[in-house]
C-alpha cells in the first residue's frame, strides 16, 4: 500500500550570518512585545488613575450615607418591628443576626469553664482532646438555661451587623 506523505520543509539555517539574522529577528520581536506590553500597562494605569479618584469619592460618600442610615436605624428601632428589616422604595435596610457564639463571662477563661464542666460530670460538653465542646453547649443552650450557663461561666452572644441592600439597576456600558 502506497501512502502519500506531505513533507513540511522548514527553512534550515546553514550559515552563521543566517543565524545572526534569525537571532536579530527574535530580539526585534521580543522588544516589540515588551514595548506593546509597556504601552498596554501604561494605558491600564492611566485608566485606573482616571477612575480611582472618582471611586474613592464614591466610597467616601457611600461610607457617610451608610453611617447616616445606621444611625437613623439605631435611633428608630420601632420602625423595624420584629422583622429586623424594612423595605423602602430603593432597597432594604435592617440588621442581620450573626451565628451564635460562646464567650466567657468576665473573669472566666475556657480553661476554667472546662474544669467546671469536668467537675460537674458533663462529658457531653467536653471533647476527647479535653477542651470545651462549644458546639454542644451552643446546641443545648436552651435546655441548659441561662442560670446553668452562668454557673458554667458562659454566656451566649449573637452579634448583629448592619446592612443596606439597594435595588440595583443595570449599569450602562461606558464608552
Image: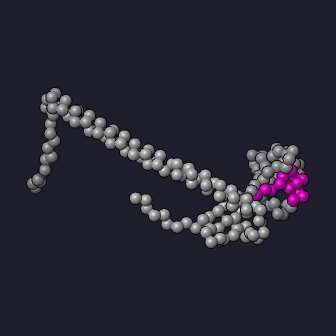
Taking 32 as reference, is 155 left or right?
right
Q: Is residue 135 above or below residue 80?
A: above
Q: Is residue 124 above or below residue 114?
A: below
- Using residue 84 as the reference point, say whether residue 152 is left or right of it: right
Name the image quarter holding the C terminus: bottom left
Indicate the position of residue 16 as horizontal and vertical percent values.
16, 27
Give 43 or 125, whichever is nearer the viewer: 43
Q: Residue at x 26, y 34 (%)?
A: 27
Q: Is residue 104 visible?
A: yes
Q: Position of residue 105 (x, y in %)?
A: 85, 49
Asked whether the viewer can see residue 126, the reply is: no
Of the 4 image quadrants, the one containing the N terminus is: bottom left
Name the residue rendered at 78%, 53% in the picture: 102
Residue range corresponding to the magenta coloring: 146-158
Q: Residue at x 79, y 51 (%)?
A: 103
Q: Viewer-proximal residue, 89 or 96?
A: 89
Amino acid at each position: 500500500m502506497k501512502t502519500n506523505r506531505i513533507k513540511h520543509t522548514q527553512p534550515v539555517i546553514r550559515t552563521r550570518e543566517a543565524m545572526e539574522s534569525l537571532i536579530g529577528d527574535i530580539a526585534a520581536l521580543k522588544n516589540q512585545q515588551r514595548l506593546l506590553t509597556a504601552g498596554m500597562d501604561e494605558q491600564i494605569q492611566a485608566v485606573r488613575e482616571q477612575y480611582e479618584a472618582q471611586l474613592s469619592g464614591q466610597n467616601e460618600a457611600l461610607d457617610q450615607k451608610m453611617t447616616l442610615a445606621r444611625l437613623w436605624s439605631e435611633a428608630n428601632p420601632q420602625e423595624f418591628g420584629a422583622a429586623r428589616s424594612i423595605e423602602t422604595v430603593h432597597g432594604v435596610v435592617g440588621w442581620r443576626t450573626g451565628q451564635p457564639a460562646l464567650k466567657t463571662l468576665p473573669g472566666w477563661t475556657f480553661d476554667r469553664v472546662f474544669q467546671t464542666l469536668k467537675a460537674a460530670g458533663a462529658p457531653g460538653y467536653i471533647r476527647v482532646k479535653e477542651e470545651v465542646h462549644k458546639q454542644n453547649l451552643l446546641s443545648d443552650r436552651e435546655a441548659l438555661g441561662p442560670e446553668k450557663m452562668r454557673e458554667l461561666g458562659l454566656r451566649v452572644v449573637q452579634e448583629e451587623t448592619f446592612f443596606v441592600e439597594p435595588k440595583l439597576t443595570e449599569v450602562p456600558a461606558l464608552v
